[in-house]
Amino acid sequence: MRIIRFILGIIILFFDWLTTPRGIKRPAEKQKIIDEQCKNFTLYQYKACPFCVKVRRAMKRLSLTIELRDPKRSESAKEELIAGAGKLKCPCLKIDEGDGEVRWMFDSKEIIAYLEGRFAEG
């Protein structure tokens, strides 16, 4: 089973690389504002997880620079995710509202809809 997961992971990453979307081109000032807003986000994700790849592709399309953390490869990221969100599940978007309030979003469709609603052009 491990070998199958490994091979599927390689295939997922290859096709992600092969079909990488282009990002939105924004004026530098506007992109700087969006980059500043993205400092309040952290995406907990696994490199070859198809749902995580889906979220990362949406981030690429929207030209978002969100910090990525892999709980599988980092014990501190794993502990943060469990302590903050209450479970070890990826993808998970941590949204720091700035007033001490933190939201955790787990569903890839919900995460993408949130990011598109907040950062999509037009």
Image (cartoon, rainbow, N blue to C red):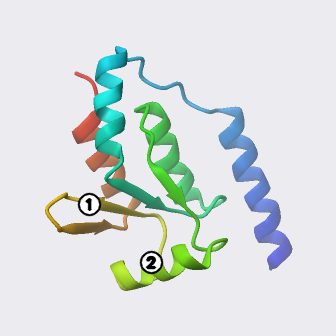
Residue at the extreme top? 27
Q: Is residue 80 left or right of residue 53?
A: left
Q: What residue type is labelled 1?
A: Asp
Work out which quarter of the rendered image holds the N terminus and state it.
bottom right
Q: Give the image quarter of residue 36.
A: top left
Give the residue pinned by disc 2: 80
Residue 96's disc number: 1
What residue do we see at 51% from left, 41% from top?
57
Q: Nearer the viewer, residue 28 or 114?
A: 28
What residue do we see at 52% from left, 55% from top?
68
Q: Position of residue 29 (x, y in %)?
A: 30, 19
The secondary element bearing badge 2 is classed as helix
Q: What residue type is labelled 2?
A: Glu
Residue at the extreme right? 3
What residue do we see at 36% from left, 36% from top?
35
Tell me how many marks there are: 2
